[in-house]
Image (spheres, rainbow, N blue to C red):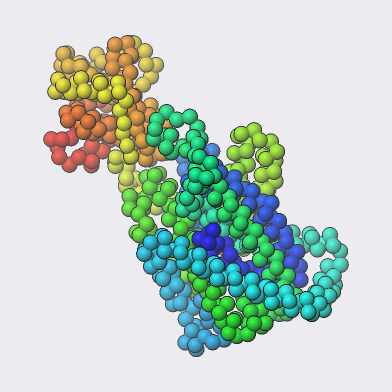
Amino acid sequence: MCLSGVDYFSTLGYQPAIAALAAGFLSPLATVVLVLLTLLGALPVYRRVARESYRGSGSIAMLEHILPWWSGKIFVLVLLGFAATDFMLTITLSAADASAHAIENPFAPEWFEGSHVPMTIALIVLLAIVFLRGFREAIGIAVVVVAVYLALNLIVIFVSTAHVITNPVVISDWWSMLTAQHSNPIMMVAVALLVFPKLALGLSGFETGVAVMPQIRNAPQHGAAEPEVACKSMSDARQSIRPNGRIHGATRLLTTAALIMSGFLIASSFLTTLLIPQEEFQEGGQANGRALAYLAHEYLGEGFGTMYDVSTICILWFAGASAMAGLLNLVPRYLPRYGMAPHWARAVRPLVLVFTVIAIIITIVFDADVDAQGGAYATGVLVLITSASVAVTLSARAKQQRKRTFGFGAITLVFLYTTVANIFERPDGIRIAMFFILGILLTSAFSRVARSFQIRATSVRFDDLALQFLQTDAERGEIQIVPHEPGDRNKSEYRAKNADERRYGHIPRKSKVIFLEVHQRDSSDFEEDLVVEGEERFGFRVLTVKSANIPATIATVLLEIRDTTGVVPHAYFEWTEGGPVSNMLKYLLFGTGEVAPVAREVLREAEKDEKRRPLIHVS
């Protein structure tokens, strides 16, 4: 909870001031609207996300399954662009705000003034060092930082509440000012509903809450893990087990964090509105971006106020930890698996260095300005929450849960309004997000092309009958494979294919052949587990395998046959009709094209020793 809480709870450092600027004396009412949206909207949505996407991939994984083929992949990449916007700007914005708190402290040395960019970069580098040390260290630091920060905030709220109780005139003064501005209660509610999208940063943290799910122990006392669906193999079964203990822990995490934050948001909003003059919230005012810090200095003295500032600086700095954890969880789960990132993108340390460099560039470009990055940050947060709402609505609809479909649909409309309102209010957010999206799409496309001739299978398994076919031929010292594009799969089709290959491929009459059929599935997939099954059809031996890519799969199966039997196989192809350019595009997009030369190129890349490389015959 603390790892996601450094992002979620750290917004207390600036959320009350943002609410006061946006809504004025209506700030408490607007905050109540935000809290209701949190508890009745975001929380139910993400509790369901945790139940259905328990591997930490969040709502993006749910939408990936709902939208198959390239449309789903591209949509996921776009969402990853918004996720990158959210997480990267969490790192840079929070570090910049931490620097601002340090500079504005009354005990800060003079040389702090004007050094906000170097200080922000130093905080980002320090965060990277923590993650380079290890993830467990990051979690330990998060627990200490959050515990201290919430304890200090609790003290500030108790002392401020006591001041309000002993000076009840501040309540009557606030009410008089509020009714003078908005005499009609209905208009108060209407204005609060209109301005609450500006408070959307108070929703930050839900996506990271499900992103850290892999760190939650699957405690057995909350129910034994159970299969999610019927599985055909042990590997499928292992991947489809529902970790009930982890799911229970994640929903408890989300609920606890939401309740804690809701209490702090309402209390801080009321107290800062009652006790701080409105002019202090404006730009240049002492409460601008640091309302609770203002109360800490005002009612508990400069010593406690400085301690509060240090705690705020720490949690704002370490808010980047939850964002970094989210990035380190999302990127390896999608981009390498799509073939859209190099293999090293699965490793933590290289990714930490890449994200650190990007964060430093963003800091320099935006001059460590918190306000300049706020719009993009809110846009990223809201788009992810809206996409999660859409995902759970579609999930409920697919399972024919009418009441939940209606409820989640209503939540989706509210978040959609909030997102659109935020984009119109601060269009710079969508512009910045587009840079991330474009960067991910272009990098992914180049990486996919560069890795097009790689072996893609993460594992290959032959069933018993397939192994029997191969071992029988291996005992004779030769294995002849005839790749065959499955059609009607009738007797005449196999007889014609066998006769043609023997005639034009010069296969000896006495040599036995084994047909290899690749039944194509979603061609946008890159990495996959291959299961090769044997069957006899009309007296012919056939190996069948399901895969997204035909040439690479044939090459992979040939290599596995060699490794399993110790015999280098021969494969007999026929030329494919069509031009080389169109065939290459078919291969990149649809996994087909000119099969023989592409399979041979994959083999050449995978096996440098020509004597051990399976032989390709084309006629």
Residue 598 location, quadrant: top left
Q: Relative to residue 142, is residue 485 depicted above or below? A: above
Residue 185 location, quadrant: bottom right
Q: Nearer the viewer, residue 551 or 308?
A: 308
Q: Nearer the viewer, residue 450 or 56?
A: 56
Residue drawn 50% across and 32% down? 229
Q: Nearer the viewer, residue 481 or 13?
A: 13
Q: Relative to residue 424, is residue 515 depicted above or below? A: above
Residue 525 place in picture, x, y as percent: 41, 39
- Viewport quadrant of the C terminus: top left
Residue farthest along the bottom direction in this orientation: 110
For the question of whether residue 170 can be seen, the reply is: no
Q: Nearer the viewer, residue 366 or 544?
A: 544
Residue drawn 20% across and 16% down? 512
| Total numbered labels placed on residues in the image | 0
Residue 532 place in picture, x, y as percent: 32, 27
Question: As drawn, is 491 to the left or to the right of 470?
Answer: right
Question: As drawn, is 197 to the left or to the right of 356?
Answer: right
For the question of whether residue 185 can be seen, the reply is: yes
Question: As drawn, is 89 to the left or to the right of 44?
Answer: left
Q: Relative to residue 434, is residue 493 depicted above or below? A: above
Residue 76 place in picture, x, y as percent: 49, 46
- Viewport quadrant of the N terminus: bottom right
Residue drawn 61% across and 57% down? 256
Residue 493 place in picture, x, y as percent: 33, 14
Residue drawn 52% across and 79% down? 102
Residue farthest along the right direction in this orientation: 183
